[in-house]
């Protein structure tokens, strides 16, 4: 009887909850710079994208997700019989090691590359060697993880596998090598922002694709994940903002005296002595980075998250003060998916993007005049009208505001503001009462302004009175949102250490 022993395996980093318990921070305020994933899910990742798959969840897919494979083929300009689906790129890395190098040899290019290649070799009982020219199987990580470089592709005698997990950030691809026998790996985990869905694919010649398919477990990708991947392909992929942010972050790190390696990916590799010590020091600020021998690697997220990283580095390296953390909150319903980051006492840095332009603009006005830092992003079922999205964006903002207010200790509690806008005049009064009350009179109402304020009052647990009149509905609404923002700025002002209630609580 065989007695198998466990192998050396890929080590996942600890969870947010485990880190939070160890260093004493709120797990909601932990930011992961160690996973090389997108800062936010794609706009297509909302419950509506899963509706059909959920309706058929009791069934197997009979065509191996033919619509998704066909969409991938069209995306890359290949034939459908050249596409294999798998549970992320990792399934193929392990599978290809077993197919082409079982008890043989494996090499990687560069030699300092993705650790999963070595674990796959162990599972195939293969030997890892340094010379790609003499290996049965050669993995070329292009662009390379963890260094971010773009290596040359060598000519090899064995099976060539080009892992292009980060190729969308480099704007290059080696798909032209497929006709010569190479296998190209891609994933939805990185640029497409679907790491949790675990969908990857291999592109190869029809002959090699048949070999791969014949050795896979049937339907290793779930129908829900396939639906998310299919929805993601329906919108053109644009990583321009992420690349711009990568270059900004690289420059800011350089300004701190660090020297990141030029990157073709969504992360930066920073050579340094004792990176493990820096990783440990950053944890107390809720910042999770990754140490390698002689280098630190950090994911590029968005400007707000990256600024937290930079502030934490300044605190560690230069003993600079650390700004207060932004509160992070998410709301997901059958109609909407919304993410918010809120700093109650900020500098008016505001970005709201849900696809509902008018009320995005209104909430921006409220947060800016409230002196907050707010980033609220998401999507909703605008095809059915604006009701669900406007309601949920205000409810989401209200929930985040309620969390940020905490027990409301040390806050002024009451605020009042009058704001004119041309012919319109708005008057707002706020009480951080802990009781949800809304008395709203907006005339004329552009459609959802009254309900927006009612939704805010309900989830923020505040008393809100708004009276606004004028001839132009846009002016009336905008004056109202500005007035509420300015009233909130008064009510949330620091005023001693007491809870402003004779009962001692709100």
Image (cartoon, rainbow, N blue to C red):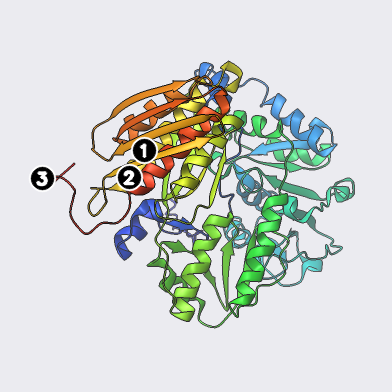
Q: Closer to the N terminus: mark 3 or mark 2?
A: 2
- Measured in 3D between alpha carbons, the distance from the residue under mark 1 to the one under mark 3, in whole angstroms, is 25 Å
Q: Is residue 250 left or right of residue 442?
A: right
**Label drawn at residue 327:** none
Residue 6, x across and y down, in percent? 44, 58
Which residue is nearer to you in this view: 67 or 483?
483
Is the residue under label 2 in contact with that under label 1 (CB below 8 Å)?
yes
Residue, disc 2: 403
Query: In this orientation, which residue lies closer to the viewer: 428 or 219?
Result: 428
Which quadrant is the C terminus positioned in?
top left
Location of residue 60 by image quarter:
top right
Callout 1 touching callout 3 (CB < 8 Å): no
Q: Position of residue 228 (x, y in %)?
A: 60, 32
Q: Can the viewer see residue 335 in this picture?
A: no
Instruction: State the image coordinates of residue 91 (x, y, percent, origin top left).
Output: 61, 46
Q: Residue lying at the far left in this picture: please name it.
A: 503
Q: Which residue is mark 3?
A: 502
Say which mark, if any, is on residue 399.
Answer: 1
- Identify the residue at horizontal 50%, vertical 27% (top origin): 390
The CA span between labels 1 and 2 is 6 Å
Q: Marks 3 and 2, how far apart in space?
A: 22 Å
Horizontal and vertical percent for residue 27? 36, 53
């Amino acid at each position: 009887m065989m007695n198998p022993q466990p192998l050396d395996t890929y080590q996942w980093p600890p969870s947010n909850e485990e880190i939070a318990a160890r260093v004493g921070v709120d797990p909601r305020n932990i930011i992961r710079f160690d996973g090389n994933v997108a800062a936010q899910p794609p706009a297509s990742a909302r419950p509506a994208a899963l509706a059909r798959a959920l309706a058929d969840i009791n069934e197997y897919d009979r065509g191996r997700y033919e619509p998704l494979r066909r969409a991938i083929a069209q995306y890359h300009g290949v034939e459908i019989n050249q596409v294999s689906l798998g549970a992320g790129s990792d399934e193929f890395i392990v599978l290809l090691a077993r197919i082409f190098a079982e008890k043989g040899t494996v090499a990687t290019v560069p030699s300092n590359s993705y650790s999963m290649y070595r674990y796959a070799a162990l599972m195939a009982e293969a030997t890892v060697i340094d010379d790609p020219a003499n290996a049965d199987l050669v993995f070329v990580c292009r662009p390379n993880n963890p260094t971010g470089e773009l290596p040359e592709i060598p000519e090899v005698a064995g099976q060539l596998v080009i892992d292009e997990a980060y190729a969308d950030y480099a704007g290059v691809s080696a798909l032209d090598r497929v006709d010569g026998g190479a296998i190209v790996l891609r994933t939805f985990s990185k640029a497409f922002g679907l790491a949790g869905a675990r969908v990857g694919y291999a592109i190869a010649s029809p002959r090699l694709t048949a070999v791969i398919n014949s050795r896979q477990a049937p339907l290793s990708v779930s129908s829900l994940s396939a639906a998310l991947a299919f929805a993601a392909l329906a919108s053109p992929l644009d990583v321009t903002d992420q690349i711009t942010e990568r270059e900004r972050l690289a420059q800011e790190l350089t300004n701190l005296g660090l020297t990141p390696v030029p990157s073709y990916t969504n992360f930066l590799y920073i050579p340094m002595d004792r990176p493990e010590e820096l990783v440990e020091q950053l944890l107390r600020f809720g910042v999770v980075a990754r140490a390698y021998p002689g280098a630190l690697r950090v994911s590029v997220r968005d400007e707000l998250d990256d600024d937290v990283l930079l502030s934490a580095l300044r605190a560690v390296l230069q003993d600079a003060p650390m700004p207060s953390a932004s509160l992070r909150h998410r709301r997901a319903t059958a109609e909407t998916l919304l993410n918010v980051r809120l700093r109650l006492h900020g500098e008016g840095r505001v970005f709201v993007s849900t696809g509902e332009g008018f009320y995005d603009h209104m909430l921006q006005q409220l947060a800016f005049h409230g002196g907050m830092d707010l980033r609220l992003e998401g999507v909703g079922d605008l095809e059915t009208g604006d009701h669900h999205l406007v309601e949920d964006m205000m409810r989401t903002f209200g929930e985040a505001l309620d969390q940020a207010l905490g027990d409301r200790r040390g806050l002024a509690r009451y605020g009042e503001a009058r704001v004119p806008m041309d012919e319109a005049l708005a008057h707002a009064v706020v009480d951080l009462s802990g009781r949800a009350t809304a008395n709203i009179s907006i005339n004329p109402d552009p459609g959802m302004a009254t309900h927006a304020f009612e939704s805010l009052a309900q989830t923020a647990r505040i008393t809100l009175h708004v009276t606004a009149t004028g001839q132009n509905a846009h002016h009336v609404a905008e004056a109202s949102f500005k007035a509420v923002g300015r009233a909130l700025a008064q009510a949330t002002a620091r005023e001693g250490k007491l809870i402003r209630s004779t009962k001692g609580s709100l």
